Image (cartoon, helix red, strand yellow):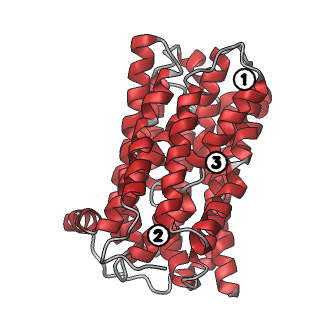
Amino acid sequence: MRVLWLALGATFFHQVLLSTSQVIPAVLAPLIILDLGVSPAVAGFYFGLTACFALVGQMGCGSFILKYGPLRMSQVALLSMAVGMAIAVQASPLAFVLLAAIGQTGAACATPASSQLLGRWSPPRLAPIVFSVKQTAVPVGILLGGSLAPSAAGWLGWQGTMLVAVGALTAFAIGLQPLRRRFDAERMPNRAFRLGDLARTMRVVTTTPSLRGLAYACFAFNGMQQVMTAYFVIYMTHLGYDLVSAGYIFSVAVVVAVPCRVLWSWLGSFHLPARLMMAWLALGMAAAALGMAFFTGAWPVLAIEAVAWVLSATALSWHGILLSETARLAPEGMVGSATGGVLSFGQAGSLICPTIYAGLLHATGSYGLGFAVCGLPALFVGLNLLWRRKPAASEPVR
């Protein structure tokens, strides 16, 4: 049990740092856009680009996790993001393309690596809670980025704020080194990377009914999460809020996701089938996305927050239950690979949904329409999960 707590602590703080770093460009987007002299719609294309590179990283990381070990690949994730952010401070569109390419490709292996690690040490009955506690690191990181980055940018500028993140990422990557001997003891040094591994991973995900359903859900959920992360603060500034106030509204909404991640997994572990739990999350997400479409500057702050809370409680809170289900249903020895395969569908959602949002914003000038449209996949997933509540014959039943 002591080893489990050690693994959970390492992966939790690792994910906090990565999530904080990943949200900084979104939170500081109004300043970056002004400095670079580009259209706000470019933010959607940037986050679509990050998803594209993350998709490649998650599909291909399985062999590297087996070869080098999950802890080593966690260090690679931190250092990749640090290098990408150090390049981005050069303040050019090309620098942000390189941030997406270097930072996101490396950072994409973080969740599959942590799943491999936690899947090894977590008792099956506790796995949903363990995975959810670890995944609360994502909203915690988003909360830290949303609340601290605007204030830090007031003192250091957006470039100085990014450099602080670079230092933190590098320091933690070095700090993980003493744990490697224990957590990477089962690595396979002779394991070779093969392009066939990518095809095998996708074949396992797409031909296993239960994993395929999780992949579709991940597409819808991750797409909506990326749209909220990329455009919420920009949307608020469009409604007339200053950057610090917009970041505060965003941060308050994100707080809701921290307990909700554990709550949903607790309900899905002990009281409701995981499929049904995810169905209700999907429908709530779609409803909140539709509510976002009707925001105006005349809305009271509390009304905006209420809708944002629901969106946060769904679009930012599904990870633990989906990842624990993936680990439970993955073939023996393929937890990391299967997780990467399912998450690659999520990255496809993160690529497609922000790109659709950016296109709609450019074509119509509406910040709300994109939320409504990008909530449609969640609606379809929710209805499908309710329609097919009975698990497939090959799917284990709790």
Residue 91 sits in which quadrant? top right
In this picture, is 117 found above or below 357? below
Residue at left offset 29%, top offset 65%: 205
Distance Cα–Cα, label 1 vs label 2 = 38 Å
Q: Which mark is residue 313?
A: 3
Q: Secondary structure at mark 3?
A: helix
The reply to whether dot 2 and dot 3 touch (C-beta < 8 Å) is: no
Q: Position of residue 338 (x, y in %)?
A: 36, 68
Q: Under tag 1, what secondary structure?
A: helix
Mark 1 burial class by Cα count in 10 Å: few <14, some 14-19, many 20+: many
Question: Secondary structure under badge 2?
Answer: helix
Looking at the image, is mark 1 or mark 3 nearer the viewer? 3
Judged left or right of residue 94, residue 393 is left
Which quarter of the figure has residue 241? Answer: top right
Q: Which mark is residue 243?
A: 1
Q: Earlier in the sequence, mark 1 or mark 3?
A: 1
Q: Quadrant of the N terminus?
A: bottom right
Residue at horizontal 53 percent and vertical 19 percent from the top: 367
Q: Which residue is mark 2?
A: 325
Question: Image point 60% across, 53% down: which residue?
Answer: 317
> Residue shown at 64%/82% (left/top)?
4
> For the residues carrying marks 1 and 2, which lies nearer the camera in this image?
2
- Of labels 2 and 3, earlier in sequence is 3
Q: Residues within 10 Å of mark 2 (few under 14, many from 20)?
A: many
Query: Looking at the picture, which amino acid does disc 2 mark?
Result: Glu
- Asked whether 255 or 18 is in front, the reply is 255
Q: Position of residue 151 (x, y in %)?
A: 79, 31
Q: Is residue 379 left or right of residue 161?
A: left
112 above or below 6? above
Vertical placement of 211 versus 248: above or below? below
Q: Is residue 71 visible?
A: yes
